[in-house]
Image (cartoon, grey):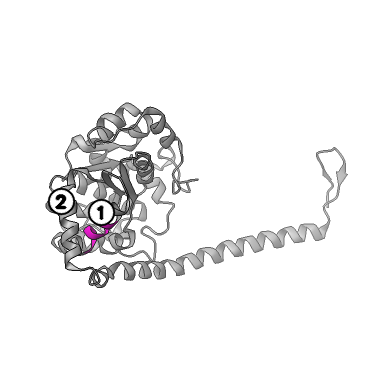
Amino acid sequence: MPPLRSFSGKTSVCHPKSFLNMQQLMLFAGVQCRLRSVARRVALPVRHKVFMSWGHLWGLRSCSISSSEQRDAQLYLSERQKNLLFVLGSGRSGTQLVTQLLEASNKVAAFHEPNFFEDIATMDTFRKHPERAMGFWSDFRSVAIYRRWRAAKNKTHYAEVTGTLRYHVSTIQKIFPSCPLYLLSRDGRGVVRSIMGWPEFYGPGSRGAYALSPLPGDICHMRWASMSRFERICWAWRDANECVMQAVPQVSWIQLERLSASFQYAHDIFLQPAGIDMNYDTFNRCVSTKSPNSSREYRFPAWKDWTHKQQHQFRDICGNTMTRLGYDF
């Protein structure tokens, strides 16, 4: 075996046993990585099933809520609906950052996806049958908001920042017609890049909200079976934004990139219309703090490193939505 020269300039020989141990370690690391991958694929359907089962129990759990509390909740929220805010959008679009921003105000009781399991479990059902969401809101969801708001002492505003209520927009508008709704958008290329690193979305064992598919009439409906995971995630970003864009006026569309970069933009487009006071220092501190679930590292390349095929597929599926939201290529 040839001698190896160390940084000190001295010559050393790699012992055969050391070389063998290194090979064994590399083999062990590879096996361990493979086992983790298999365990994740096996665990994913189980996790989804548990989450969905718990979420679907909202009907049973609502039986423990008295009709008087349900009426109190409706009255309480109806009287305060102008201060009841919902910031909606797709996943991986900065919802936690906006929650941090709202939490910094002493006026706002802000929550990030507070009824996550229930909202995720019912998402596909209410997307296909929006009329069924009315019972969910009157019997369960409104009471949950009522309890949280009352528990937050001296908070004049209540806000939920979430990607899980986007298919509830029409129901929210019927129950609370004066309630401010906002669309939080992020450049689709960044969202797709982020979600591609999450095996929960459109993976082999994905179900329900993690594997939504186009409804009849959607341009992708007929070719869904032949679409790749990448194309499906592109479609999911487009659909999530389009369903909110149809209900929320353009003046209430917020671009994450501009919001996090400009206090003036955040003040004029979002904070002032919502009746929230905030100074520049507080704003700057919030947007400078990395949110807990932000992507630490990306497993999928940036737009400039996508293949020509991927760029073409993204333009084909998301191009029109990107343009309407004010993003260009």
Residue at (16% x, 39% y) in the render: 249
Q: Can residue 310 be seen at all in this image of the molecule? A: no
Q: CA distance from mark 1 to mark 2?
A: 19 Å
In the image, is 12 to the left or to the right of 231?
right
Residue 152 position, x and y percent, is: 32, 50
Q: Quadrant of residue 143?
A: bottom left
Q: Which of the pair 247/141 is nearer the observer?
A: 141
Residue 226 position, x and y percent, is 30, 58
Residue at the disc numbered 1: 165
Give the mark, 1 or 2, whose residue is nearer the N terminus.
2
Q: Quadrant of the C terminus?
A: top left
Residue 5, percent across and down? 82, 42
Front in this rendered view, residue 140 or 220: 140
Q: Which residues are magenta?
A: 140-147
Which of the 4 image quadrants contains residue 68?
bottom left
Q: How many marks?
A: 2
239 vs 14, nearest the viewer: 239
Q: Main secondary structure of the magenta part?
A: helix
Whether residue 279 appears in this view of the structure is: yes
- How many neighbours does mark 1 have within 10 angstroms: few (below 14), some (14-19), or many (20 or more)? many
Disc number lying in front (1 or 2): 2
Label 2 sits on residue: 78
Label 2: how many Cα within 10 Å (few below 14, some 14–19, many 20+): some
Q: Is residue 288 left or right of residue 102?
A: right
